[in-house]
Image: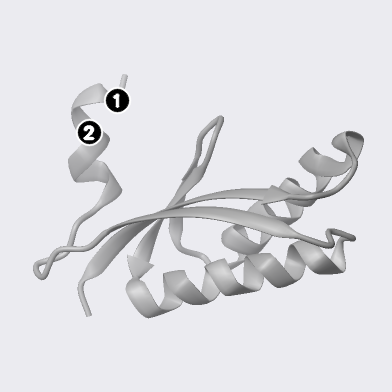
Amino acid sequence: MALSNLSLQILPIVPDNEVYSVVDEVISLIKASNLKYVVGPMETTIEGELDVLLKIVKDAQTVCVKAGAERVISIVKIDYKTGGVTIDEKTAKYSK
């Protein structure tokens, strides 16, 4: 399957002082996948096969619930093209 990009913004419903620590756990999950990813201020973009990326989204929900969130809101954006798409082809011209 071709490479896709998935951007995940996850909003765990926890007390304000716990939001970043829960999001950090989700980023650790993404890091453990060994996929290419870029953390931004509002979302994290991951590069991989679509089925794997969608499983990460599902697992992120579980991570948040295990960390104490009773509700999790996720905003997901997917860029899929039959020949594949990479983070680098989108951002290379902006790299310093």
- Label 2: element kind: helix
Depth check: give the residue in front, 12 or 45: 12
Q: How far, Cα to Cα, is label 2 from label 1? A: 5 Å
Tell me the quarter of the image containing the C terminus: top left
How would you rate the neighbour count of disc 1 (Cα within 10 Å): few for under 14, some for 14-19, many for 20 or more?
few
From the top left corner, tell me how far across and down residue 5 is, in percent. Answer: 32, 56
Tell me the quarter of the image containing the N terminus: bottom left
- For the point 51% across and 65% down, the residue is 34
Callouts 2 and 1 close, C-beta under 8 Å? yes
**Coloring scheme of the render?**
one colour
Q: Residue 95: which disc?
A: 1
Identify whether 78 is placed above or below 40.
below
- For the point 45% across and 63% down, the residue is 35
Q: Is residue 77 left or right of residue 90?
A: right
**Mark 2 highlights which residue?**
92
Depth check: give the residue in front, 88 or 55: 55
Q: On the image, which quarter does residue 42 sit in?
A: top right
Q: Is residue 7 left or right of residue 28?
A: left
Amino acid type indicated by mark 2: Ala
Q: Number of callouts in the render?
A: 2
